[in-house]
Structures are given as structure tokens and as C-alpha cells.
Image: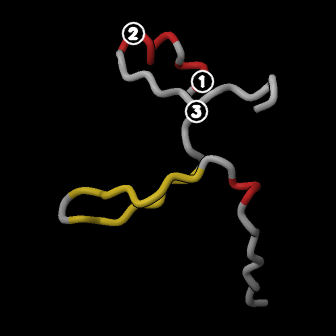
Amino acid sequence: MSSATKPPFTDTAPTKVANNGHRLRPPEIVIARKSGRFWAIRDKLFDLDQYQKVKIPTAS
């Protein structure tokens, strides 16, 4: 582990989570499916740069 990399955040106490909010970031994309009246989260993508970009052909 390099000196710039921090260990993963594992605390669950509310005060520790609030004090370490700067370490938490929202996902760029959330993939969910409808389950009855509610949505079930299937995946969260945090870094889109690591995924291969697909070119979608446009109809002209």
C-alpha cells in the first residue's frame, strides 16, 4: 500500500461516520431494478474511467 492510499473505511458508529464524511463519496451511476413499488439497487459505479466506453452508432 502506498503512502497516498488510505485503508478502506469500515467504522459504523454514527459519530465516526459523520467525522469521516470527507472520505465518503457518492457513486457516479446507480444501477437498479423495479421490485414491486420500490427500487432494488443492483450495483453502484464509482469510477467510470475503469470501464470500457462503448460507442453507440447514431442514426443520420
Quarter residue 33 falls in: bottom left
Marks 1/2 in contact by CB < 8 Å: the verdict is no
Tell how many labels: 3
Question: What is the distance, in whole Å, between disc 3 and disc 1 at their CAs?
Answer: 7 Å
Nearer to the camera, 28 or 52: 52
Q: Which residue is mark 2?
A: 15
Pick out the residue farthest to the bottom: 60
Q: Give the residue displayed 58% in from the left and 31% down from the top.
A: 8
Question: What is the distance, in whole Å, between disc 2 and disc 3 at their CAs?
Answer: 17 Å
Q: Give the residue displayed 24% in from the left and 56% down from the top.
A: 38
Marks 3/1 in contact by CB < 8 Å: the verdict is yes
Q: What percent of the width, then of the height, locates residue 2?
A: 81, 29
Q: On screen, 54 above or below 2? A: below
Pick out the residue farthest to the left: 36
Q: Between label 2 and label 3, give the one nearer the viewer.
A: 2
Q: Quadrant of the C terminus?
A: bottom right
Q: What percent of the width, then of the height, locates residue 25?
A: 58, 33
Mark 1 / mark 2, whichever is N-terminal:
2
Marks 2/3 in contact by CB < 8 Å: the verdict is no
Q: On screen, 48 above or below 3? A: below
Question: Which SS class for mark 3?
Answer: loop
Q: Amino acid at mark 1?
A: Arg
Q: Which residue is mark 3?
A: 25
Mark 2 / mark 3, whichever is N-terminal:
2
Q: Quadrant of the N terminus?
A: top right
Q: Amino acid at mark 2?
A: Thr
Question: Going by the image, does 13 lie left or right of 55?
Answer: left
Q: Which residue is mark 1?
A: 23
Question: Which SS class for mark 1?
Answer: helix
Q: What percent of the width, then of the height, locates residue 32?
A: 40, 61
